[in-house]
Image: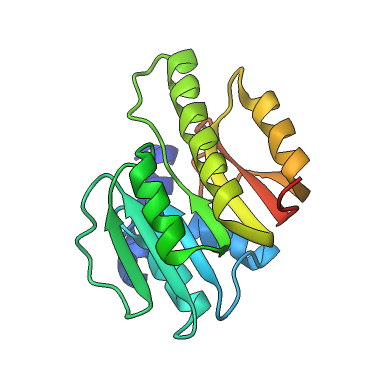
Amino acid sequence: MSGSYRFQDHYFHRAKKDHYLARAVYKLEEIQNRHRIMRPGDRVLDLGAAPGSWVQLASGVVGPRGRVVAVDVKPIEHSFEGNVTVQQGDVFDDAIVEQLLRDHAPFDAVLSDMAPTTSGIRSADSARSSLLFERALVVAERALRPGGHFLAKIFHGSEFHDLLVRVKRRFRRVKVVKPDASRKMSKEIYILGMEYKGDI
């Protein structure tokens, strides 16, 4: 059994045991434990939420007084707690975004674990990932309350530095995070923007 398989197997089985929908939950759990980007009563927007493990964790953190809005172009079939709203739609569709803002904003946190379908061509994959990250940031800039937090996945590539600079302009504190639950060979990392400055 290879090391990478053992690693995947560990988190896969841990997720099953903990009744989470995917192993990706442990990435958010680690970031949440370190940085407290969600709190009881918060409103959280989860972009690219399927299959829903981040929604499960966020729902538990914000509790019954909070609200988690989950969006994905794919259907999210899991039945969540009553503090979760599921919206099937494409975040690149301006009408979907306008509806989210109208019905649910402002949010205390915007999360994105969106990732492209990979081709194996590193430059192409990182470019597609950067487009998803940039869209998540655009949505966050409109949806977050001042002081809110933003967390999104990105593949490290040529666009990374410019996007990091953009986040630093909009948030008071910014960290680049690679959670332990990310595969060591994976090019995915997360940019965490804390304390949104609001309109500038």
Q: Position of residue 45 (x, y in %)?
A: 47, 59
Q: Position of residue 11 (x, y in %)?
A: 41, 56
Task: From the viewer's side, name the closer residue of 115 and 171.
Answer: 171
Q: Quadrant of residue 4?
A: top left
Q: Position of residue 78 (x, y in %)?
A: 22, 66
Furthest toward the bottom, the residue is: 64
Identify the residue shown where x is 61% and y is 17%: 158
Q: Quadrant of residue 118?
A: top left
Task: From the viewer's side, name the closer residue of 25 and 139.
Answer: 139
Colour pattern of the rendering: rainbow
Task: From the viewer's side, name the closer residue of 5 and 99.
Answer: 99
In the picture, measured across the screen, residue 55 lies left or right of residue 62, that is left
**Is 55 rendered above or below residue 142?**
below
Identify the residue shown where x is 28% and y is 47%: 89
Identify the residue shown where x is 31% and y is 49%: 72
Identify the residue shown where x is 31% and y is 42%: 90
Q: Is any atom of residue 25 visible in this view?
A: no
**Is 131 rendered above or below residue 146?**
above
User: How many discs appear?
Assistant: 0
In the picture, measured across the screen, residue 46 lies left or right of residue 35, that is left
**Is 142 rendered above or below residue 15?**
above
Furthest toward the right, the residue is: 172
Task: From the viewer's side, name the closer residue of 25 and 138.
Answer: 138
Please state, as top left, top right, bottom left or bottom right, where the C terminus lies in the image: top right
Q: Is any atom of residue 30 visible in this view?
A: yes
Please state, as top left, top right, bottom left or bottom right, where the N terminus lies in the image: top left
Q: Position of residue 142 (x, y in %)?
A: 57, 49
